[in-house]
Image (cartoon, rainbow, N blue to C red):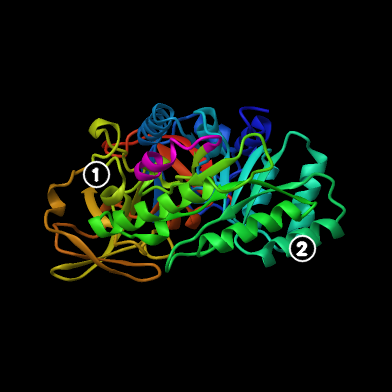
Amino acid sequence: MGTGIDNAAVDAQRTERLDWRFKAIPAAAHGATVEEYLRDRPSLDDFGTPLLTLDAGALDHNLRLMAGWAERAGVRLAPHGKTTMAPELWRRQLDAGAWGITLANLPQLRVARAFGVQRLLLANALVDPAGLAWIGGELDRDPDFTFVSWADSPRTVELMDDALRAARVQRAVHVCVELGGPHGRTGARDEQTALAVADAIRKAPTLRLAGLGGYEGALAHDASDEGRAAVDAYLRALAELHGRLEYETDEPIVTAGGSSFFDQVTEVLSGLDGCQVILRSGAYIIHDDGFYRQISPFARGAANGGERLRSAMHGWGRVVSRPEPALALLDTGKRDLPFDEGMPEPQLVRGAGPERLAGARVTAMNDQHTFLEGGDVEVGDVLRLGLSHPCTALDKWTLLPVVDDAGAERPVVTDLIRTWF
């Protein structure tokens, strides 16, 4: 085991043979293992389009920046693993000091356990009887495994307890009361309900009240004064509720903090007595050239003296048609790149730099095409695209080339990262 993950299982991914299952991989690589293929340091020019790549330098920079900031702030990280679903990247986060890995649903938990992740936080309720029986079996089988789930109603607690009793699970499942907010996502909507949930957890013999959780990011989609005030009010309610709970563990946790307002979370919660404050920021390791570039505390100058995260993901598309003077069509679309938090941003023409894309913009995307308006491009040109929202980017790729410098004239592929969505 490494720092909370099975190193042998993670390393074994490098013995997987490359073939047609991986749309990023050129046919010339088929038959080789990942390790064999990387020995010759292939060029990005060997890869076709469409393509999504990760930038090695940006990944390392982002890991260092966030880990250092959390340490100085006196909080712990349990990065949300759903962003990447990549055990190799989880390992890097754990090696950088992360407390554990956060996940969102049962299939993601199964991936994490397959790779031996030893401390998991489910930022969700688990009421599926078969899923509860499985997680209970994992706890009984592995005494070093730590698992924490959420509940936001007495009914949730009742269902969990019934399923765990039926499965005859021996170890108690640790549960956080989840506090929500107006028009937010899940979570008890008021303190009275939250206290009732806590009381139900304490009365359930299969459960232990282990902490308090919530998600402030559902209450604001921008960093306006109004949005930040809504986040602040919610966090102060979370802090007040913490003071009224009687936990059943020696080290209860209070957890909040996505990738947009972790500075406020730390400001309000880091001084709480008798608990560990756990941030669940997930997007920071990849970051982006869109939504998070605008809203991240690092981008807003609210953290780390102005040092910023860097986008570690880029899309690549080839011009396949110029049917009109001001229109070009690329061979990449919604099946390949994210679009839910903004269109891709044209950045440069490979081998020619950014000058030929002055004034160019993406106006629309279809399943397999991107519409580029303006710019001096011709059929055959390969464009690098800045992307928005890593959470809907990596899920489109099972194997991601990592390049040494995405801005270089001839980037070298130094790694291939396996995802398990």
Left or right, 163 with respect to 415, comes to: right
- Disc number for residue 163: none
Q: Height in image: 171 above or below 364?
A: above
Q: What residue do we see at 63% from left, 27% from top?
A: 2
- Disc number for residue 129: 2
Tally of marks: 2
Q: Which residue is mark 1?
A: 300
Q: What residue do we see at 75% from left, 54% from top?
A: 203
Question: Per the image, is 380 magenta?
Answer: no
Residue 294 location, x and y as percent? 26, 51
Q: Are marks 1 and 2 in contact (CB under 8 Å)?
A: no
Q: Which residues are magenta?
A: 263-276
Residue 116 location, x and y as percent? 69, 38
The image quadrant that residue 325 belongs to is bottom left
Identify which amino acid the numbered label 2 is placed on: Pro
227 and 380: which one is in front? Answer: 227
Q: From where the camera sits, is residue 384 visible?
A: no
Badge 2 crowding class, 10 Å Cα cut-off, few under 14, some 14 to 19, many 20 or more, is some
Q: Height in image: 307 above or below 343?
A: above
The image quadrant that residue 131 belongs to is bottom right
Identify which amino acid the numbered label 1 is placed on: Arg
Residue 134 location, x and y as percent? 77, 53
